[in-house]
Amino acid sequence: MTKDGKEMKWTRKDLLSLEELSREEIEMILQTADSFKEVSSREIKKVPALRGKTIANLFFESSTRTRTSFELAAKRLSADIINFSSAGSSTSKGENLRDTARNIEAMQIDTIVMRHSSSGSAEYLARSLKAGVVNAGDGTHEHPTQGLLDLFTIRGRKKKFEGLNVCLVGDILHSRVARSNIWGLKKLGAKVTLCGPPTLIPKEIENLGVEISYDLDSVLPKQDVLNILRIQLERQSHAFFPSIREYAAEYGISNERMKKAKKDVMVMHPGPVNRGVELSGEVADGEQSVILEQVTNGVAVRMAVLFLTTLVERG
Ligand code: CP
């Protein structure tokens, strides 16, 4: 249902980015997730919504949360799910991505969930397949279901986005989570600030209507939400800051730094957390942290995404 009360119909077989979604489509996913959240609190955590459908998890990069969460989401919707990881597969014999995916699709798969290190790989696959494609993170481009679960978690606590100050802290340059958050938050009306070392914030990102700051202590007091990003050392080809210790001193969220923040500030992190670098253990486990709530909400949001994309009418 849209704001003006009109019934909305989902029309996409793929979920590739939050950039491509309208505000109404994002709201439709969040509303669908509202109804699925309750399923996970039942004694029997299952509904028959996708009975007879088959989902394939294709993960070409490591994952703990996203992969498990998609698997649980599919199972709670009564879909069959197969898990594929590149280790031990025929990709090691030279099979390319399109052939791998087309062979899996040939087993009558309805939706493929894919994580890959190449930006744009999910869109490439979506154009090559009749099956739906859900992007579970493509290189440094987007991680749309992480963006959606972050929006769902913020909405659960703060109720509205208009006028809300959200700060994404850290390695913006390499972060697909940052890009999905920026698109989603801006579409829903939040004010977004990016804060980190100048070398980790690409200048052109200002064109997305965000504020940029290199001084965390000066922007911290007005923030309602802090979304702390992982320092992605595996994607950094050279040193972007002098040392981990200096990064933690300038941008790490410690108990001491939290004294400057609003009392009801939400502390978020997509995981995995580098404790003592971008976030201290005390803050990660503290009262303002919603990190595990994000993980819980991820299942409901992914149930919503699989439900909408898998049941869409296909041409
Ligand atoms: N947030 C996230 O994508 O975590 P994983 O890499 O464990 O899936």
Image (cartoon, rainbow, N blue to C red):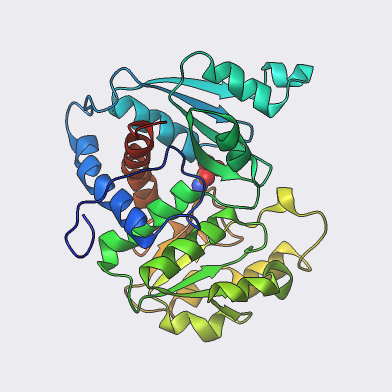
**Is residue 256 rendered to the left or right of residue 197?**
left
Residue at point 28%, 46% (across, down): 9
Residue 101, percent across and down?
60, 24
Q: Which of the two residues, 224 or 244, is positioned nearer the viewer here? A: 224
- Is residue 269 in view from this perspective? yes
Residue at point 72%, 48% (across, down): 234
**Is residue 36 rendered to the left or right of residue 269?**
left
Residue at point 50%, 65% (across, down): 182
**Is residue 137 rendered to the left or right of residue 40?**
right
Residue 76, percent across and down?
29, 28
Residue at point 61%, 60% (across, down): 277
Q: Which of the two residues, 291 or 53, is positioned nearer the viewer here? A: 53
Q: Is residue 22 above or below residue 89?
A: below
Quadrant for the N terminus, please.
bottom left
Residue 147, percent across and down?
45, 54
- Is residue 253 in view from this perspective? no
